[in-house]
Amino acid sequence: MAKLTRQIDDAVLVAPGAKSQLRKRATVADDIFPDREAAEDATKENARAIDALQDALWAERRHSVLVILQGIDTSGKDGTVRGVFNRCGPLGVAVTAFGRPSDEELAHDFLWRVHMAAPKRGMIGVFNRSQYEDVLVVKVRGLAPPEVVEQRYDEINAFEKHLTDNGVCVLKFMLNISKDEQRERLQARLDDPKKNWKFNASDLEDRKLWDDYQRAYEIALDRCSTEHAPWRVVPADRKWQRNAIIAAVVRKELEDMAPVYPKPDWKPSDFQIT
Ligand code: AMP
Ligand code: MG
C-alpha cells in the first residue's frame, strides 16, 4: 500500500515550485495499474476504507477533507465522485458542483461561494470544479481583466493556506485526458440516447480552445501546487485507472490524518439500560 501510493505520487504529484510540464504528463497509467480487475478491486476496498475513516473523522470532529476535482469537459469529474465515494454514507460526504456564477455570486469576491461550501469538521467535501475555474474558463474566455486573474493565483494559495491551517486537508486532482479521448467521449454523448442529455454545444466551443485551456491549466498547476495543497495530475483516459489512483491517494491521506474515536469522560458501566 505505502509502496503503491509512493509510486502513484512519483507519477502524479506536481512538486511545489517546479514546472508542472502538463504536456509531458501521461493520460494513461498502465505502469501503475496494468490490470483492470485488480484496479477495480483495489478501488472498492479503498472506497470502503474511506468510509470507515470518515466515520472516525466525524466522531473526532477536528479535521475535514476537501477533494477538488478539476478537468476539461468529459474528463470524468462526476464519474470520480461516483466511483470513489460511492461507499461513503450520504451524511459524511458533501458534493458541490460549481457552474457559471449567479448574479449574487458575481456580486461577491470569487472565493465567497467556495468558502461557503468548504467542509465542516468531520466531513469530506468534494468540489466538482472549484475556485480554479476563476483562473481557467475566466482566463481563457476573458471573463475578467487579465490583472484580476493574475492576482487570483496568490489569493487562491492564501485561501488554501487558511483552510489547511484551520484543519482542512486539501487534495487537488486534475483529471488529465487526451484530446482524442475527449473526442470519443463527446461523440458518445451524441450517439448514445442515454448520454444525449450530457451534450452541450458550448463544450464544442471549449474544445476549439483546447490549447488555451491546457496552457491555463499549466499555469494554475505551476503557480498553485504548494506544500500545503499540492496538485496531482491524474491520468484519466481510463476511468478505472483514474478511480484507482484517486481512491488510493484519498485513503492514504485519511490514514495519515489518523482520526481517532474520542474516549468518553464516563464509563459504560456507570449506566444500566433497563
Ligand atoms: P458543467 O460542469 O458541465 O455542469 O458546466 C459548468 C460550466 O460552468 C462550465 O462550462 C464551467 O466552465 C462554468 N463555470 C464554472 N465556474 C465558472 C466561473 N467561475 N466563471 C464562469 N464560468 C464558470
Ligand atoms: Mg460541461
Image (cartoon, rainbow, N blue to C red):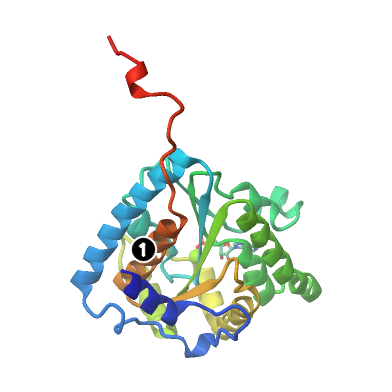
Residue 235 in sight from this viewpoint: no
Q: Residue at x 54, y 88 (%)?
A: 21
Quadrant of the image for the N terminus? bottom left
What residue did someone put label 1 on? 247
Where residue 36 appears, x then y in whole percent? 22, 73
Q: Residue furthest top?
A: 274
Question: Are there few (<14), some (14-19), or many (20+) residues within 10 Å of tag 1?
Answer: many
Q: Residue at x 44, y 59 (%)?
A: 256
Taking the spot 66% from the left edge, 77% from the top edge, the residue there is 223
In the rendered image, is residue 255 in sight? yes
Q: Position of residue 229 (x, y in %)?
A: 58, 66
Identify the element where label 1 is drawn. helix
Residue 152 spot, x, y in % from top left: 73, 68
The residue lying toward the viewer, choosing from 219 and 168, is 168
* Relative horizontal placement of residue 135, taking residue 147 as reference (left or right): left
Q: Residue furthest left?
A: 37
Residue nearest the observer in this picture, 141 or 108: 108
Q: Is residue 4 left or right of residue 149?
A: left
Which amino acid type corresponds to the residue marked 1 in the rendered image?
Answer: Ala
Identify which residue, 149 or 180, lies in the foreground.
149
User: At which x and y percent is residue 106?
Assistant: 73, 54
Is 67 rendered above or below residue 15?
A: above
Q: Is residue 199 above or below residue 141?
A: above
Is 172 placed left or right of 5 in the picture? right
Depth check: give the residue in front, 185 or 223.
223
Quarter of the figure with the C terminus: top left
Q: Disc 1, ligand 1: is the CB inside 8 Å?
A: no
Residue 226 appears in which quarter of the rendering?
bottom right
